[in-house]
């Protein structure tokens, strides 16, 4: 996307881009983990080039793009590197208390295989594949040798599914991504490497480019730590449409690499999001008032959590109103600033346990200093709160509702707290983040899960549990997994077959004890949580359910 100081302030249609087709960084959470722990990385920003000081809101990371620091800017001739502007920008980000996400796109004309490929706004050859891909690797090596860990993460290219930014093939982009990863990890192993970003607005572009690109990365052993997407919906669309587009992008990823592929558990960052950008086609741009803008921004960050997206970069913090985007964020936009800060305060440091969708009502259950719920309407249509009327609530705009009474929910998120009675703000007894659906040590039908932990299994950290079943000495217990889906809240149960069960949990010992070691792959971006219970051979005796932390699996 084009920043305000990159040229004219005239609005730029997405169609024009597609007509041809403390900071918690290491290790980064996978999408499944990100649906559990909410860190400051979730609240990140793009920065307009005319902004030379800190933004007016805190950011976990700041994305350096379209600021005169791309490959073509820093490396204008073979062996020549001009670091001054990038030095200044990295210092600016660090002074703001943020970390750097660097975007390594735009081919220098001297390195381009096709010097005529490239939008004039970004320069001749900027969209071309390099004639010699080693030149890209050489640049990345020089970049990391200079900055090392001062660059927390690298996005290997910008919007590679758009001909404006890339005219090469998906396989050529996968090759550059692998070269970047090797160069980065050789110098700074702690820097995280993200795939080239993909815009989700036009699904055919996602299918035609991103699908083959993801498959090519799989063929190379996934030389990335995560995926990046840009989720601008159509100009007349809302955060609900953005949510659906992320589902569609994941469907393409799943069909391209396989539902059980390790690529499905990679981190996902949305590194550009705003609303009202003109297009596709003749759909005119939209300008949103402060209330609507604040509502959309607040909803976007909560929806990212629902989707397991662990980093969301608002596009963008500017020095003044910027005509390209419909939701403004600068010092004069008090409503959007307040919404950003409020949702950040609500959630950073908390744990998202699960989300339920019942008809129009969405409820997401969090634990932090105290348990709380964030509730909203699935489609934005008015829907009444269906729980206790004695609770307290705060809306995304700061309005307090005490007690709730006949609270009507809509597009904007509402935080609901329970006071002394925590029960209504928990689901299935979730009181210990990422550990158990019930307190360990409780007994159901004679099976007691006494403790949970982790162990190493074939270089993986896996979930373990131990307990007693005095009435089942010598008997085989069967592990059963209950998976709850992110989007629908629906649950399904799968029990292991006898041979697999015997490997996971040996028969109950003569002393009535048992141990369980998880050997089943449970990571999936579509799952909000996975819980486990143990039963006897007939299924008539079952333990209480224990949640398997997605960080272990």
Image: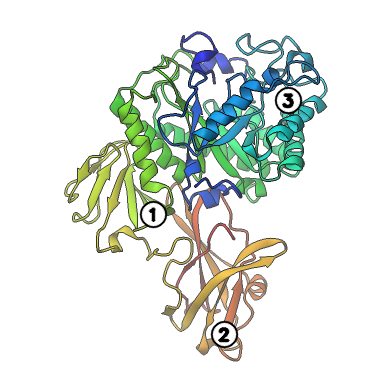
Precedes in sequence: disc 2 or disc 3: 3
Residue 102 lies, in percent from the top left, at 62, 31
Q: Residue at x 50, y 8 (%)?
A: 8
Precedes in sequence: disc 2 or disc 1: 1
> Which residue is the site of mark 3?
169
- Looking at the picture, tell me which residue is in the foreground, 154 or 34: 154
Instruction: Farthest residue to the bottom: give it.
Output: 510
Residue 19 lies, in percent from the top left, at 58, 15
> Which residue is the site of mark 1?
366
Secondary structure at numbered mark 1? strand
Q: Is 311 left, or right, of 303 in this rendering?
A: right
> Which residue is the site of mark 2?
513
Secondary structure at numbered mark 2? strand
Q: Residue at x 52, y 43 (%)?
A: 310
Precedes in sequence: disc 3 or disc 1: 3
On the question of residue 159 being in view, the answer is no
Q: Is 353 left, or right, of 94 in this rendering?
A: left
């Amino acid at each position: 996307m084009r920043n305000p100081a990159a040229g004219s302030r005239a609005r730029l249609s997405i169609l024009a881009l597609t007509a041809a087709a403390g900071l918690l960084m290491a290790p980064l959470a996978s999408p499944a983990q990100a649906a559990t722990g909410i860190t400051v990385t979730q609240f990140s920003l793009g920065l307009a080039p005319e902004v030379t000081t800190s933004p007016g809101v805190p950011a976990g990371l700041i994305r350096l793009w379209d600021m005169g620091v791309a490959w073509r800017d820093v490396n204008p001739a073979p062996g020549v590197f001009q670091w001054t502007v990038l030095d200044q920008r990295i210092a600016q980000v660090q002074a703001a208390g943020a970390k750097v996400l660097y975007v390594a796109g735009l081919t220098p004309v001297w390195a381009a295989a096709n010097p005529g490929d490239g939008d004039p706004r970004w320069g001749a050859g900027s969209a071309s594949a390099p004639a010699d891909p080693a030149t890209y690797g050489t640049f990345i090596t020089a970049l990391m040798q200079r900055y090392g860990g001062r660059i927390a993460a690298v996005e290997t290219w910008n919007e590679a599914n758009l001909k404006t930014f890339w005219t090469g093939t998906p396989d050529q982009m996968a090759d550059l991504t692998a070269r970047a990863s090797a160069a980065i990890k050789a110098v700074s192993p702690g820097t995280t490497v993200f795939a080239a970003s993909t815009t989700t607005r036009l699904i055919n572009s996602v299918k035609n480019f991103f699908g083959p690109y993801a498959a090519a990365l799989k063929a190379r052993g996934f030389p990335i730590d995560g995926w990046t997407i840009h989720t601008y919906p159509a100009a007349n669309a809302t955060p609900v449409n953005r949510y659906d587009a992320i589902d569609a992008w994941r469907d393409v990823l799943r069909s391209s690499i396989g539902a059980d592929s390790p690529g499905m558990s990679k981190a996902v960052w949305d590194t550009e999001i705003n609303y009202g950008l003109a297009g596709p086609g003749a759909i005119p741009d939209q300008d949103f008032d402060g209330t609507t803008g604040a509502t959309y921004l607040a909803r976007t960050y909560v929806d990212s959590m629902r989707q397991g997206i662990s980093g969301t970069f608002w596009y963008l913090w500017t020095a003044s109103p910027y005509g390209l985007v419909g939701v403004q964020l600068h010092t004069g936009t008090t409503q959007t600033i307040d919404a950003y800060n409020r949702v950040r305060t609500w959630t950073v440091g908390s744990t998202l346990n699960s989300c339920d969708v019942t008809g129009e009502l969405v409820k997401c259950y969090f634990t932090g200093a105290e348990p709380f719920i964030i509730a909203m309407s699935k489609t934005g249509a008015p829907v009444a709160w269906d729980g206790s009327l004695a609770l307290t609530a705060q809306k995304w705009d700061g309005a307090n509702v005490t007690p709730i009474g006949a609270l009507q929910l809509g597009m904007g998120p509402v935080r609901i707290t329970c006071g002394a009675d925590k029960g209504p703000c928990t689901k299935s007894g979730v009181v210990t983040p990422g550990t158990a659906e019930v307190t360990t040590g409780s007994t159901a039908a004679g099976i007691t899960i006494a403790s949970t932990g982790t162990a190493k299994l074939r270089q993986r950290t896996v979930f373990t549990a131990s307990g007693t079943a005095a009435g089942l000495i010598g008997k085989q217990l069967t592990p059963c997994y209950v998976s709850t889906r992110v989007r629908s809240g629906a649950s399904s149960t799968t029990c292991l077959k006898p041979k697999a069960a015997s490997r996971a949990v040996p028969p109950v010992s003569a002393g009535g004890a048992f141990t369980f070691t998880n050997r089943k792959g449970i990571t999936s971006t579509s799952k909000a949580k996975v819980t486990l219970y143990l039963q006897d051979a007939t299924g008539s005796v079952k333990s209480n359910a224990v949640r398997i932390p997605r960080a272990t699996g």
